[in-house]
Image: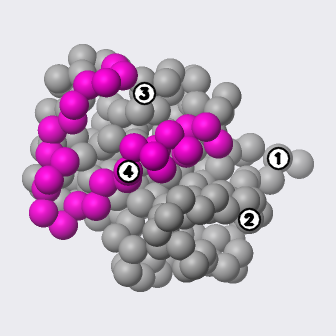
Amino acid sequence: MRGRRLRGESVPGVRPTSSRVREALFDVLGARVPGCAFLDLFAGTGAVGLEALSRGAARAVFVEADRRAARATAENLRLLGGPAGEILEMGAGRALARLAERGDRFEVVFLDPPWDLDLGDVLPRAARAVAPKGVLVLEHRTGRVPSAADVPGLTPGRSYRHGDASLSLFLAAPPG
């Protein structure tokens, strides 16, 4: 699906993950992506989850509360003709509760919230959605990495700075 233009890149209130940061993210994730279950929280127009599907993820769940952005994600899925993804048009907290009720776990959980949003209980809930040996990746404003206490059950990994944006990894401990 490389090189295709996505719809909705100018949805008001949506700050898309830059192509440079997306490329860095998938360089870091590497072999984790093919065959994985990928959760794209605060998905916006779905560019990151679509990239995961393009790189061989078995499935992707897109969570986006903004109706226009969720519709853009649905349109992008249709236009790209790639694997089907599931779109949950609701807030992250509600979506994480629904996914937990279903018993869904993900090898990769990606969060790209509005940078000044108080994540409250979203980070701990997102941490519980990470499968054993999985990873949670948080895109955030450079210099504002959450503490390990904000992400219980996961071990902080590296952070990667890309100008104003940084990616911080939190790793699930292997079972046992």
Principal secondary structure, stretch drawn in magenta? loop
SS assignment at label 3: helix
The amino acid at mark 2 is Pro
Alpha carbon distance from label 3 to label 2? 26 Å
Give yes or no for residue 35 being in the magenta stretch: no
Give the residue displayed 64% in from the left and 71% down from the top: 151
- Can you identify the residue that label 4 sits on? 18
Please state if 7 lies on the left or on the right of 97 as rendered.
left
Label disc, if present, on residue 156 of the rendered structure: 2
SS assignment at label 4: loop
Please state if 102 lies on the left or on the right of 138 as rendered.
left
SS assignment at label 1: loop
Please state the extent of the stretch shown in magenta in the rendering. Answer: 1-28
Label disc, if present, on residue 53 of the rendered structure: 3
The mark lying in front, picked from 1 and 3, is: 3
Q: Are marks 4 and 2 in contact (CB under 8 Å)?
A: no
Alpha carbon distance from label 1 to label 2? 17 Å
Give the residue displayed 82% in from the left and 47% down from the top: 174
Alpha carbon distance from label 4 to label 2? 24 Å
Q: Are marks 1 and 2 in contact (CB under 8 Å)?
A: no
The amino acid at mark 3 is Leu
The mark lying in front, picked from 1 and 2, is: 2
The amino acid at mark 1 is Pro
**Disc 4 packing (10 Å; few <14; some 14–19; many ≥20):** few
Give the residue displayed 74% in from the left and 43% down from the top: 133
Give yes or no for residue 17 being in the magenta stretch: yes
Total count of labels: 4
